[in-house]
Amino acid sequence: MKRIGSIAVFLLVLASTTIGAQEPPSSSRASDAATFRTHTDLVALNVTVTNRADKHVTGLQPNQFVILENGVRQPLTFFSAESVPLDLAILIDGSASMQGKIEHARAAAAGLARSMRSGDRASVVEFRDTVRLRQRLTTDTSAVESAIGEIVARGSTALYDALYIALKELTTASRDEQQVRRRAIVLLSDGADTASLSSYDDISELARRAGVVVYAVSLKSPADVALQNLSSGGRPFQRETDYGMKVLAQETGGRAFFPEKPAELKGIYDGIAEELGHQYAIGYVPTDPRRDGAWRRVAVQVLAGDARPRTRAGYYTPAPDRRAGPEPVSQQ
């Protein structure tokens, strides 16, 4: 996978890391404590639970969650219904096509930043021909808002490169963390990628390995709306990039939005903020101890009437150490 130019220079500062999960508490039961030392055994999941009316379901207990890995039920090791600290990357399209829309985008993103709670961190990534990390992860909300306010519209759209850099920054930042932290990306763009060195396949693979929830907001242009209105058979028109972002969001446990007007952005961002504030953090130590680098599909069920859980589709197990030969996952 080739990485050249400005993205390569940027990534030299970001130490590449294998995504670690977290060590369960010493107690054998599920714990409400959000802080414990990290370990590669635990598979951590952020779970959003809504009902048929798309309202968040609160007050659920650990025994109401069922975790399946490749169809096999797993014992719940970690549980928190409180607000587990969040690392949030806010990605904003600063290309020329955002002229006349960037004010709405900045206002909506600033509102999202103001929703941060104690212990949460946010970063700001601006992308056009190149990608600029305007603000590294920080708990300083005013610094995040200031960085958002500096974004202006000009140039092309390096959407995939922005996602690549944001995923790398979030995973690198969590490398030495000693507590469970949720990680999410909120991406806003109004068009197809026109300037990236990365491909959609690159991003999709990296996101699956990272365990970062992706929320994609794709603002439609007047031309897109016109094509949708003229589409035959009642089928809505959808750009290839939009379809890819929708799949990426579903695979990571997030959501995709396709507003037609910039004024809709505030409501969408407020909804994302509300969702991030109502997630359950759960985790388990896999009963299958093999370290073979394989993809394992994960499903979460909730035993509570109309509850509809949403989380990432799965994860990759750690790759075997080729020098020493395959070893099973420690169960300590």
Image (cartoon, rainbow, N blue to C red):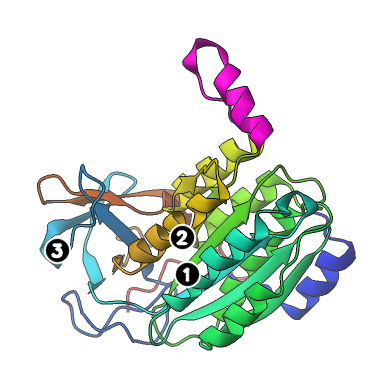
Q: The residue under label 1 is which amino acid type?
A: Leu
Select label 3 or label 2 by which is in front.
2
Q: Residue at x 60, y 55 (%)?
A: 188
**Residue 239 horizontal/vertical position (percent):** 64, 33
Give the extent of the magenta segment. 222-238
Q: Residue at x 21, y 80 (%)?
A: 32
Q: Is mark 3 on a helix, strand or loop?
A: loop
The answer to whether the residue labelled 1 contacts the one labelled 2, judged by CB atoms less than 8 Å apart, is yes
10 Å crowding of disc 1: few (<14), some (14-19), many (20+) = many
Residue 15 showing in the rendered view: no
Asked whether 304 or 267 is in front, the reply is 267
* Residue situated furthest top in the rendering: 233
Q: Mark 3 points at which residue?
A: 60
Q: Which residue is drawn at 57% across and 69% down?
A: 89
Select label 3 or label 1 by which is in front.
1
Residue 306, by quadrant, is top left
Residue 143 lies in the magenta stretch: no
Q: What element carries label 2?
A: helix
Mark sitting earlier along the chain (3/2) = 3
Residue 204 showing in the rendered view: yes
Mark sitting earlier along the chain (3/1) = 3
- Left or right of residue 57: residue 130: right
Q: Mark 1 points at which residue?
A: 112
Marker disc for residue 269? 2
Q: Measure the alpha-carbon separation of dots 3 and 2.
A: 25 Å
Q: The residue under label 3 is which amino acid type?
A: Leu
- Left or right of residue 195: residue 62: left
